[in-house]
Image (cartoon, helix red, strand yellow):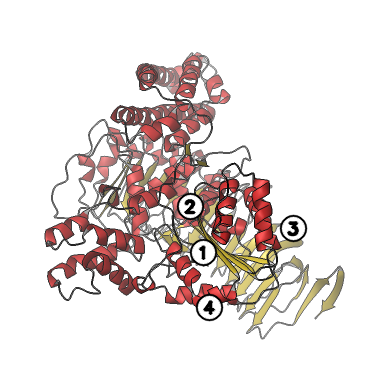
Amino acid sequence: MSFIGEAALSAVIDALFGKLSDGLLKTFRKENFDADLKKWKRMLLKIRAVLDDAEEKRVTSTSVKFWLDELEGLAYDVDDILDEFATEALRRELNPEPKSKMQKVLDGYVGSNRDFVKLMRSKIEGIDRRLKEIVEEKKDLELRENTGRRTITKTSRPPSTSLVNESRTYGRDEDKKEIVKLLLESSDAQLSVIPIVGMGGLGKTTLAQLVYKDDEVSRHFELKAWVCVSEDFDNLRLTREILHSFTSKSWEDNSTLNSLQGELKNTLSGKKFLLILDDVWNENYELWTELCKPFEFGAQGSKIVVTTRNDDVSSIMGTSPPYKLKELSRDACLRVFTHHALDATDFSEYPELKKYGQEIVDRCKGAPLAAKALGGLLRSKHDPCEWEDVLNSKIWDIPEDKSIIFSCLKLSYNYLPSHLKRCFAYCSLFPKDNIFEEKELVLLWVAEGLVQETKRKKPMEDLGGEYFRDLHKRSFFQQSSYDKSLFVMHDLMHDLAQWAAGDLCYRLEVQLGGSKQSEISTKVRHFSYIKHSNDCIQMFDEDVHLRTFLSLPLYNRYGLTNFDVKYCSFPQLRCLRVLSLSGNDILELPSSIGDLKHLRYLNLSYTKIATLPESTSSLYNLQTLMLKGCNSLTKLPEKIENLVNLQHLNISNANSIREMPTGIAKLKSLQTLCFEDMNECQDWIPCGEGEEFPCLRELSISICPKLGKFSYHLPSLEKLSIRACKQLVVSIPSHSVIQVLEIVGCKEVNVHGSVKIEKLIIKNCEELKSLCEDGHMSLEAPEIEIRSCQIPVNIKLKSTLRKLTINDCSALESLEFVIDEGGASSTSS
């Protein structure tokens, strides 16, 4: 048996358990809400127990699918109510109850409290009724309780063989040469394992077949074997199949693992062998080490080639860096398609089909399995209308008995843990070919509650980064070919994300002047639009509970679109976690923005707003505030300190801001702070003794020529970047530990005492004469780069120096450093 991940809805229910905490229950004990919330918890536990079985039956049972859809809507509504409780608890903490009855009346406290209780009591009654119906319906569906992770007993794709027709494969000649070279090269290792990694459908198996068949490879190895592993990594089965492939002998089904491994050891002993393990999913290191025990008795230079979709598999099994298989070239993909569709190499005999064929190939984005599958659908069909239908179809519209491509991709999705399934599905909000940053996407996931808090108490952004890298390692994301710091999704993966999202996500791409869009389903929770008219919000029914409203692209400097901001006050927007109006022609925000009490992420970048309404300060849950490129913005809210959960503030290129509000020093949750090209900003608010940003991890200050002294204590700082700040004095306290310190085009920077810096970069500081007040500093920095600077000081460097670069520093008088070599120290000047 092999294992696959839990149902995506499981993560939603688990998140609700986390919110039904003792602290929340205690806060509302006086209003008797705690009893209701405890009852919800018990009922949700009963539902959670059958979710995985329900997910398996969703495809074959209409009643189960309807039950899951109802449950999903209910879970989100429960989440909204729990967030309202948490927000009310936070409001009470920030605005404590007045002590005197008269003061309560004057402050309006009694009325607001009574209104909240009345409103929540009504909502709770509605949830109670729906929860009871869900639990009752569960009994009729005969759902089994979970016994662990879901299992499957048969593979979701046909097993592969070593046979291949080389004349019918295209575009892999260079890849074949590289793998053959790795197999033939001499090695001191007894056994080498070479992983081939790539997204499902890229042709990893075909490449392995080509290598396995190669004549030079066959002459080099005494024994060869091919085994398709797939999802079921059972050592007994695999050892039997490997032994059979090497010897062509059959072995009894009742043979033990011990006897089979003994036979395999004798077969391989002293012989140089090649083993192909195709389509491996196992991430259990112990299972792998147990399987490979007999392989250690082969001759020196034996090789194993592993094909997998997952980098984690390659890191467990591989002894060399993985070979990352790329997409086919367009010409090669076109030849695969025309071969299977027309049994030809081009469209010369069918010119009327060329337009559709080329667009179908473009859609395949270099995935040979997609080109083969879509070509096979059109084999012997020469009607242009049929070709157009295939071009416009989604991968899940194609019956699985006619095409393997969707089942191949869906298998990757099935193996995801429940929390990653939700994060991946959320990516369907972005258009195809969208290029994105890791941090940009992670901040959205965190704001949406898709990142689950763990017992390790790790920062949510760090956990989100782990989610992102996990999806990347599993080939759901790919690095951009233009910039390695950016990422893209393959078109087929994007189609898979749309399928996974179902009705939860909706992306509107109708252009201006296009046909009128009908109303959007009330099941939609996450919405994005691209260059649409300003009345797009009118397409929603009054009962919809949107959590996401994204104007795309998120950072659009050019071609501002129109959006009538008055629609932000509509009731259906009050459940929003994410609101991005970036790149819209907006002059002001209404005060009703403060009604969006659930809001975690607000992006107003590249808009024309001059001020933020003071009601913005009541967004207690706000985590991210993006004001990048707001050239007309002159100030931030005076009571910004009320944004107690604000973690990320970006006001880069908001160059009309002249000063910071006094409350900015009270943002104790702030983690990243970005200032750039703020020519008019002159004054930091003076901070008192011991004032600090305790959580600030990243500070970037660029092109702020009038900005004065920055002397806050930053105990958690990891990255500090200061660029073109002629008057800025930044005091770095003694004993700080900073991963990256970058100083570019600056005049004065002070470092006090001993500082540990992982990487120090100083560039273009022609007026920088000192890095510290007394002319000396003790600096522990393994990597140092100094370019085009005047620093006539004695800098004492200690610890192991890995990299030192000094260029164009004509005024540099001396540099003293201590290099540790095996415990000994030497000093150079």
Give above or below for 491 relative to 415. below
Q: Are marks 2 and 1 in contact (CB under 8 Å)?
A: no
Closest to the observer, 223 or 128: 223
Mark 2 or mark 1, which is nearer to you? 1
Res. 599 image quadrant: top left
- In the picture as drawn, the residue positioned furthest to the right comes out as 824
- For the residue labelled by badge 3, is the local secondary structure a helix, a strand or a loop? loop
| Rendered location of residue 413, percent (x, y) | 42, 47
| Mark with earlier residue (2, 3) | 2
Task: From the viewer's perspective, tell me whether residue 532 is left or right of residue 53.
Answer: left
Task: From the viewer's perspective, tell me whether residue 371 is left or right of residue 533.
Answer: right
Mark 2 or mark 3, which is nearer to you? 2
* Amino acid type for the residue under numbered disc 1: Ile
| Mark with earlier residue (2, 1) | 1
Q: What residue is pinned by disc 3?
A: 734
Q: Are marks 1 and 3 in contact (CB under 8 Å)?
A: no
Circle 4 packing at 10 Å, graded few (<14), some (14-19), many (20+), is: few
Label 1, label 4: how far apart the Cα atoms are = 20 Å
Label 2, label 1: how far apart the Cα atoms are = 17 Å
| Mark with earlier residue (2, 4) | 4
Mark number displayed over residue 471: 2
Closest to the observer, 343 or 786: 343
Res. 767 image quadrant: bottom right
Q: What residue is pinned by disc 1?
A: 196
Circle 1 packing at 10 Å, graded few (<14), some (14-19), many (20+), is: many
